[in-house]
Image (cartoon, helix red, strand yellow):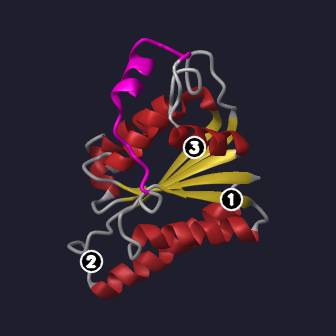
């Protein structure tokens, strides 16, 4: 299976980056191919232009889609599945990933006269500073799933899954405890890649 991995984190020395590397290792060892769209490294522009707004607001499929957006859409249609790896900032993905969806999910591609292919799977690997139990109690995790899986993926994929790696804030655990937790989570990220088709 060919997987497009959309990665969004500003630091190359982050736990989220380690999750990405472990996941890619699992994909590779299972025989999957992949392409990484690193939104920060590629400097992806996430602000709507006036022209893009007009195209979307007035359903003007006759207006051009920007070249950088077309490139992302080609990557999606060349993939069999898609994975998103990012941290949670205030119960949401980083603004750069939100902007990626706003620009790439264009009229005539992701909705309307849709040219986006039906993907086999969407997997979200999400890192979180806080406690998953607390966020579930506050119904924040369900809100995250509603936005990402219910809205952004919806019927564009056959099945979707979200895996959350929580309590990564340094205020929760001692350095030793945090390292053990990192080791556990990186193993899970590897497994998610290795067993991607299951």
Marks 3/2: CA–CA distance: 38 Å
Q: Vertically, is 91 above or below 169? A: above
- Tell me the element at label 3: helix
Q: Which residue is mark 1?
A: 34
Give the CA distance from mark 1 to mark 3.
14 Å
Pick the front one: 134 or 127 = 127
Residue 103 painted magenta:
no
Tell me: 17 left or right of 32. left
Query: Looking at the image, do the residues carrying marks 2 and 1 touch, with CB atoms under 8 Å apart?
Result: no
For the magenta stretch, what is the residue range? 43-62
Q: Is residue 172 left or right of residue 112?
A: left
Q: Is residue 60 magenta?
A: yes
Q: Main secondary structure of the magenta part?
A: loop
The answer, for residue 188, to whether it is visible in the render is no
Q: Residue at x 43, y 67 (%)?
A: 16
**Place of residue 24 in the rendered image (x, y in percent of width and height, measured from the top left):** 62, 67
Distance from Cα at disc 2 to Cα at disc 1: 34 Å
Is 66 situated above or below 18?
Answer: above
Q: Residue at x 63, y 21 (%)?
A: 114
List the single residue furthest toward the left: 171
Which mark is first along the chain, 2 or 3?
3
Left or right of 98? Residue 78 is right
């Amino acid at each position: 299976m060919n997987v497009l991995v959309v990665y969004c984190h500003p630091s190359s020395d982050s736990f989220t980056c380690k999750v990405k590397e472990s996941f890619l290792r699992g994909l590779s060892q299972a025989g999957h191919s992949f392409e990484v769209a690193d939104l920060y490294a590629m400097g992806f522009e996430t602000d709507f232009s006036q022209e893009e707004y007009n195209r979307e607001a007035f359903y003007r499929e006759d207006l051009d889609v920007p070249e950088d957006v077309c490139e992302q859409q080609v990557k999606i249609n060349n993939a069999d599945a898609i994975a998103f790896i990012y941290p949670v900032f205030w119960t949401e993905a980083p603004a750069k990933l939100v902007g990626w969806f706003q620009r790439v999910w264009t009229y005539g591609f992701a909705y309307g006269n849709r040219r986006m292919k039906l993907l086999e799977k969407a997997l979200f690997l999400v890192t979180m500073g806080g406690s998953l139990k607390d966020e579930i109690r506050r119904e924040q995790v369900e809100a995250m799933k509603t936005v990402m899986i219910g809205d952004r993926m919806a019927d564009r994929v056959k099945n979707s899954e979200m895996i959350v790696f929580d309590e990564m804030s340094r205020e929760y655990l001692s350095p030793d405890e945090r390292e053990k937790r990192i080791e556990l989570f990186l193993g899970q990220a590897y497994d998610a890649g290795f067993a991607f088709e299951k």
